[in-house]
Image (cartoon, grey):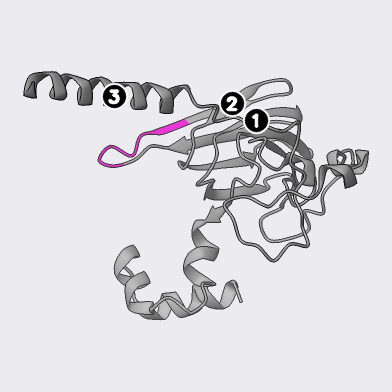
Amino acid sequence: MASTQICLIGLLSVSFFVACLAADSNNILDFCVADIYSHVFVNGAPCKDPKTAHADDFYFTGLDKQGNFSNPMGSKATPVYVQQIPGLNTLGLSMVRVDFAPDGLNPPHTHPRASEIMTVLEGTLEVGFIGTAPDYRHFSKILNKGDVFVFPMGLLHYQRNVGKVNAVAIAALNSQNPGTSSIAPALFTSKPVLNDEIISKTFLFDKKNVVILRSKFN
């Protein structure tokens, strides 16, 4: 009797596990347009009433226009995330245009929630990413018009214009809101301010250098 009960419990457990695996984890609606005015906080964005959705919820214009890269980095990213297209909500994708002046740099940064695939439309870019400890392997490539490169999720990566003319790239990401964390701004413009002692010890230089670098970002 006891063995029968054990078998029954085991069978039910396996059935429950299989049912969980078989559950539909994808959208169960045609779409879930983000309600950008909602004060409800969820992982993503709440849906607005589908009956109020319209074509503009799935539309963005402007990627044909050059971004203003007149800044110290010489680059400008124009994102098309869920904030720009509410209809991207729950779809798990977005894109971005990046413009570069000659010698412009999209400095080392990460996307904690997305992998990225980039293609060069104009110009020549040096691109690369760095793996994790203990090896910190550096993978880099020179890309010309039409070339494609992939940056794995969460890894530090960058792009630099190594040509003599402006460069343009378009990238797709597998998140509606991939997030961006750039090393220098994260360390020197955090709120509240990160202790100078932490930064100086991290980079093995004097605290007066931290003050100098922080002033460049504020």
Query: How far apart are the two marked residues, 1 and 3, measured between alpha carbons?
Result: 47 Å
Q: Are marks 1 and 2 in contact (CB under 8 Å)?
A: yes
Query: How far apart are the two marked residues, 1 and 2, measured between alpha carbons?
Result: 5 Å
Query: How far apart are the two marked residues, 2 and 3, measured between alpha carbons?
Result: 47 Å
Location of mark 2 (residue) = 149
Which residue is drawn at the image coordinates 37% and 70% (left, top)?
199
Q: Quadrant of residue 164?
A: top right
Sequence-first disc among 2 and 3: 3
In x, y percent, where is residue 212? 50, 77
Which residue is drawn at the image coordinates 76% and 31% (left, top)?
30
Q: Amino acid at mark 2?
A: Phe
Location of mark 3 (residue) = 12
Image disc number at residue 118? 1
Q: What kind of element bears circle 1? A: strand
The vertical placement of 102 against 38, above or below, is: above
Sequence-first disc among 1 and 2: 1
Give the prevailing secondary structure in the magenta stretch.
loop
Q: Nearer the viewer, residue 216 or 195?
A: 195
Q: Nearer the viewer, mark 2 or mark 3?
A: 3
Q: Amino acid at mark 3?
A: Leu
Sequence-first disc among 1 and 3: 3
Q: Which residues are magenta?
A: 133-139
Q: Nearer the viewer, mark 1 or mark 3?
A: 3
Q: Residues within 10 Å of mark 3 (few under 14, many from 20)?
A: few
The vertical placement of 17 against 32, above or below, is: above
Q: Are marks 2 and 3 in contact (CB under 8 Å)?
A: no
Q: Visible in this render: residue 174?
A: yes
